[in-house]
Image (cartoon, helix red, strand yellow):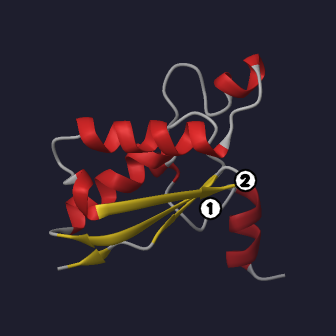
Amino acid sequence: MTAHHEEREHHHYHSHPQTRYYYGYYGPYHRQAAGAVTDQDIKADVQSALQWDSYVDAGKVNVSVENGMVTLRGTVGSPLEKRAAGDDAWDTPGVVDVNNELKLA
């Protein structure tokens, strides 16, 4: 076992930045506790979040949901807009994963 490998085990090495996955006050599954959240509910909530986000042109983002997994498709104007759309999806209750396939113009 190398010293570098030991360091990862002892420091809980993560391959992605943990700060991207923030869930707000209730956590990612609070709505599921009260009852099952349907894919249609999630899609409507993500679309609403995109509409309210001043960083995102919601008309350019196509949202699809399958088993709580959100896929974003379309073309946006900047990396910030792509990131904001992905964050909006992650912040939506019931979402278990986000596949951000948005392209940059």
Mark 1: give few (<14), some (14-19) or many (20+) Cα within 10 Å: few
Determine crowd level at label 2: few under 14, some 14-19, many 20+ residues with C-alpha closer than 10 A: few
Residue 54 visible (yes or no): yes
Q: Where is residue 80? Give x, y as percent.
A: 21, 60
Q: Which mark is residue 14?
A: 1
Please tell me which residue lies in front, 102 or 4.
102
Is tag 1's residue or tag 2's residue first in the polypeptide sequence? 1
Task: Give residue 73's quadrant in the image.
Answer: bottom left
Q: Quadrant of the C terminus?
A: bottom left
Q: Nearer the viewer, residue 23 or 56?
A: 56
State the image quarter where residue 65 is shown: bottom right
Instruction: Tell me the mark number nearer the camera, choosing from 1 and 2.
Output: 2
Residue shown at 64%/38% (left/top)? 94
Circle 2 sits in a helix, a strand or a loop, which is it? Answer: loop
Residue 97: horizontal and vertical position, in percent?
62, 56
- Amino acid type of the residue tagged 1 in the rendering: His
- Residue under the image location 16 percent in, 41 percent down: 54
Residue 100 image-quadrant placement:
bottom left
State the residue lying farthest toward the right.
1
Is any part of residue 91 visible from this angle?
no
Q: Position of residue 15 (x, y in %)?
A: 59, 68
**Disc 1 secondary structure class:** loop
User: Nearest the camera: 98 or 38?
Assistant: 38
Disc 1 from disc 2: Cα separation = 26 Å
Amino acid bearing label 2: Asn
Q: Residue at x 68, y 39 (%)?
A: 38
Please give left or right for residue 57 compared with residue 67 in the image: left
On the rendered structure, is 4 left or right of 99?
A: right
Left or right for 5, reference 103: right
Residue, disc 2: 67
Residue 45 screen position, x and y as percent: 46, 36
